[in-house]
Structures are given as C-alpha cells and as structure tokens.
Amino acid sequence: MNIGELSKSSGVNAKLIRHYESIGLIPETRRNENGYRMYSEDDVHYVRFIKRSRELGFSLEDIKSLIGLWKNKSRSSKQVKQLAEKHLEELNLKLKQIKDMADTLKHLVHHCHGDHRPDCPILKQLETN
C-alpha cells in the first residue's frame, strides 16, 4: 500500500508518517521502482500503535521505548508498567499545575470588577509575577 492508503487505514496524516519513519519509530520501508514508499499491514499496526500512544500523551522517546518493548517478546510486563507509571506521574503533575493556574485565574477574575475603572487585579498580577 502507498502512504495515502496507510494514512487512511491508520488515521494519521502522511506528513506525520514520514516524520515517524525519519526518526525511526516506523521501520524503514521498501520503495517501488518509482521510488515511492510501499507499506504493509505491519506498518499499519506500527502507526496505529504510535497514534494510540500519542493520544495517551506519551513522548516520542517513550513511544520508541514502548515499541521496543512491544516487539520484544521476552520483555517483562514490569518494564511496561514502570514506563506507564512514570508517565502517569507526569500527567498528574501537569493536572495539578493546570488546576493551580485555573484556581489563581478564577480568584483574579472574581476580584476584577470588569467595569469602566482602569484598576484590574489580573493585570497587576501579571505585572508583578
């Protein structure tokens, strides 16, 4: 199949597929006599795996590790779990940071009169911090 068909089968655009191939997430594929990349069903699985991993927020570096574990049939699930737990900790930290930002902004919005007066605690906070 060509890159357009792979894109359609996987739900990932062709430019991103080329990028994944260039950084080694997808094994380099064969080319036909005209130089066009030719992909297999295995490539569809790779791209879908990468897509699902990205949807969960894994970094490209972590995805490379996950692919290595996925392809290594002698792996232990402990390795996979450790990688997932590390990522979960990072996500929880990001959630806390976002909640803290939202709480601060909510407080500032509550104290801003939003009328004709020029005084605004939102701008004061941005200026001082």
Image (cartoon, rainbow, N blue to C red):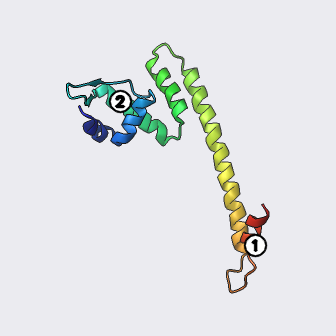
Location of residue 128 in the rendering, given as x and y in whole percent from the top left corner:
79, 64
The three-letter code of the residue at mark 1 reads: Pro
Residue shown at the point (72%, 62%) measured from the top left: 104
- The nearer-to-camera label among 2 and 1 is 1
In this rendering, is residue 28 above or below 15? above
x%, y% of residue 90? 64, 39
CA–CA distance in space, label 2 to label 1:
52 Å
- Is there any visible trace of residue 12 in the rendered image? no
The residue most toward the bottom is 116
Report the residue marked by disc 1.
121
Instruction: Identify the secondary structure beneath mark 2.
Output: helix
Q: Quadrant of residue 86?
A: top right
Q: Position of residue 22 (x, y in %)?
A: 42, 30
Q: Earlier in the sequence, mark 2 or mark 1?
A: 2
Q: Is 40 above or below relative to 4?
A: above
Q: Quadrant location of the N terminus? A: top left
As drawn, which residue projects farthest toward the front? 34
Residue drawn where x is 50% and y is 21% of the image: 69
Depth check, front residue: 85 or 47: 47
Which residue, given by chain and number where applicable, does mark 2 sit on? Answer: 45
Q: Is residue 8 left or right of residue 78?
A: left
Quick one: SS at disc 1?
Answer: helix
Task: Please state the horizontal and vertical placement of residue 5, each as a whole percent of the image.
Answer: 25, 37
Q: Residue at x 27, y 26 (%)?
A: 40
- Among the 4 quarters of the image, the one containing residue 38: top left
Report the number of discs.
2
Quadrant holding the C terminus: bottom right
Other-residue count near label 1 (Cα within 10 Å), few / some / many at <14 / 14–19 / ≥20: some
